[in-house]
Image (spheres, grey):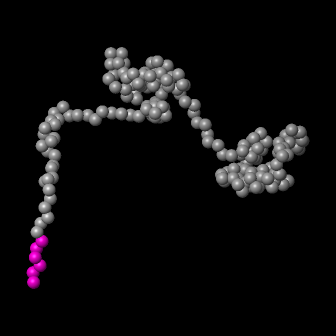
Amino acid sequence: MIPFRLRMGEIMAAAVGLRQDYTAQDLRQSAKRARDAGHARRLLALADIYDGGSRGDAARVGGVGLQTVRDWVLRFNSKGSDGLVSGKAPGQPSKLNDGQRQALAAIIDSGPIPAVHGVVRWRLVDLAQWLWEEFRVSISKQTLSRELRAMKFRKLSARPRHHAQDAEEQEAFKKTLPPAWKRSRRRRASR
C-alpha cells in the first residue's frame, strides 16, 4: 500500500488492489450463476471496481460501508470468488472433548450404581453433576441433552404401573364383540 497525503498533513492508505486474474465480466458471469443473493451482490460490487468505479460506488452497489467493501476485497484476493460466499457462523465450541464424551458414554452404558452414585437411574441433572465431579465441566441440561442426542442416546423411561393395578380386572373390563354378526331381516315394502 502506498500512502498519499490529504489536506493538513493527514496520510491515508491507498486502496487494496484487486487480483488481476479476474475481470468485471468474469465476476458478472459468476454473479449470474450464484445461488446466494448476498454472494451475487458482493460479486457485482467488486465488478464495479474492476470497471473503474470508486470504492464508494461499490459500497453503494453492495449496500454496505467502505470498510465492508475492503473486507470483501481482502477475502476475494485470498480465496477468489469462493471467498465471498456467505458461510455459516461456527458458533461456540463444544464443552466436552472426545475423551469426556467416551467416559460419559461408558458411564451411561454401565448404568448407575446406587451405592456409589446415589441414584437408581440417570437423569440429565445427575449426569451434569457427574461431569462436574469428574471433569470440572459445568454444562446445562439442555446442552447435555443435545450432546447425548448427537452421541445417538435417546431418553427412555419405563411405563409406570400403579401399585393397585389388577390384571384380572383389566381383562374383565375389556369390551368384547359377539363372535358373529347377523344381518337383520329386511322389512317388506308395503304395497
Check residue 132 for magenta coloring.
no
| Closer-to-camera residue (11/173) | 173
Residue 31's spot in the image, x, y percent?
72, 54
| Residue 27 against residue 100 in the figure, above or below | below
Q: Is residue 130 visible?
A: yes
| Closer-to-camera residue (140/157) | 157
Residue 149's spot in the image, x, y percent?
46, 34
Q: How many marks?
A: 0
Principal secondary structure, stretch drawn in magenta: loop
Residue segment shown in magenta: 186-191
Is 171 displayed left or right of 112 in the figure?
left
Check residue 188 for magenta coloring.
yes
Q: Quadrant of residue 171?
A: top left
Is 75 displayed left or right of 105 in the figure?
right
Q: Residue at x 82, y 48 (%)?
A: 22
Report the residue that reaches farthest toward the bottom: 191
Residue 27's spot in the image, x, y percent?
77, 52
| Closer-to-camera residue (132/12) | 132
| Residue 127 against residue 51 in the figure, above or below | above
| Closer-to-camera residue (63/178) | 178
Q: Quadrant of residue 157?
A: top left
Q: Residue at x 45, y 25 (%)?
A: 105
Report the residue that reaches farthest toward the top: 116
Q: Is residue 45 visible?
A: no
Q: Residue at x 41, y 24 (%)?
A: 109
Q: Residue at x 14, y 64 (%)?
A: 183
From the image, which quarter does the C terminus lie in?
bottom left
